[in-house]
Image (cartoon, grey):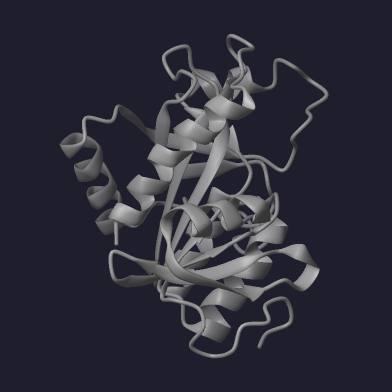
Amino acid sequence: MSIHLAAEKGEIAETVLLPGDPLRAKWISETFLKDAFCYNQVRGMLGFTGTYQGKPVSVQGSGMGIPSTLVYCNELIKEYGVQRIIRVGSAGSYQPDVHLNDIVIAMSASTDSNTNANRFPNATFAPTVSFGLFQKAVRYSQEHQIPIKAGNVLSSDTFYDDDPEYFKQWADYGVLCVEMETAGIYSLAAKYRIEALTLLTISDSLVTKEELSHQERESSFTKMVEMALATL
C-alpha cells in the first residue's frame, strides 16, 4: 500500500487509464472491463482493475489539476510499477476548427504551472507524448474512421480565469485546447522512463461558447475510452 492508494502489490496493472473524475473511473470499469474489482477508496478516489480483451488494465481517478494528478502518478509508478499511463479527459477548445465531440491527442503540453519551472530554473522543459502510444492511437483512429486533432494543448492551473480573453494568446500560437493535467503527466513519464498518452474529448468551446450536454458527453467519451483501450 501507499499513502493514497490502498491496493496490495500486484492489484494494479502495468497500464492505467487516468480519468480525473473517480466516478468516471467507476463507469469505465463497469462498461469496458471484465471481472473488475475496486482496489482503492481512499479519499473517495476510486480505482479499479479488470481485464480488457484478456489483458489486465486499471482505471484510477486522479482529481483535477497537476498537483492532485501527480500524487497518484508518483505512487502508481514508484510503488506499483506502472509502465503506461493514459489520461482520458475533457477539454475546452481554443480553435474554431476544434469542435465539440472532437478527440484531441496531446502531442505536447504547454503550461502556466510552475511544476517544471521549479525543476528547471532559467530553462524550459517541453513535455511530450510517448511516440509508440501516439502511433497506436492514430492508427486506431484511421482504421475506425474517427476524426482526431493532434498537437499542443495547454495544461492550466486556473479553471476560472479572471480574463475571458486569456485563451487568445495561446490560440494565436496554435494551442488546440485547454485541460489541467497533461504537462505534469508527460514530465513525470519522462523522468521515470515510462509511456504516457493523453486523449481528450472536447466538451466545450471558448471560441463559440458551446458545450455538450450530459448525455452527449457520455456517448462521445465512449469513443475516447475505446481508443485508449485499443492502445493495449
Q: Quadrant of the N terminus?
A: bottom right
Compare residues 104 and 173 and report the one nearer the observer.
Answer: 104
Residue 109 at x, y = what percent?
50, 44
When asked about the image quadrant of residue 161, the answer is: top right
Of all residues, the one furthest to the right in this rendering is: 162
Residue 163 at x, y = what percent?
78, 20
Residue 136 at x, y = what percent?
24, 51
16 on left or right of 223:
right
22 on left or right of 219:
right
**Exactly how many numbered labels are in the figure?**
0
- Image height of 47 relative to 133, above or below: below
12 on left or right of 42:
left
Give me the residue at 47% from left, 32% from top: 219
Is any part of residue 106 visible from this angle?
Answer: no
Residue 107 at x, y = what percent?
38, 43
Is any part of residue 139 visible from this angle?
Answer: yes
Q: Quadrant of the C terminus?
A: bottom left
Give me the residue at 19% from left, 35% from top: 142
Of all residues, the one furthest to the left in this rendering is: 143
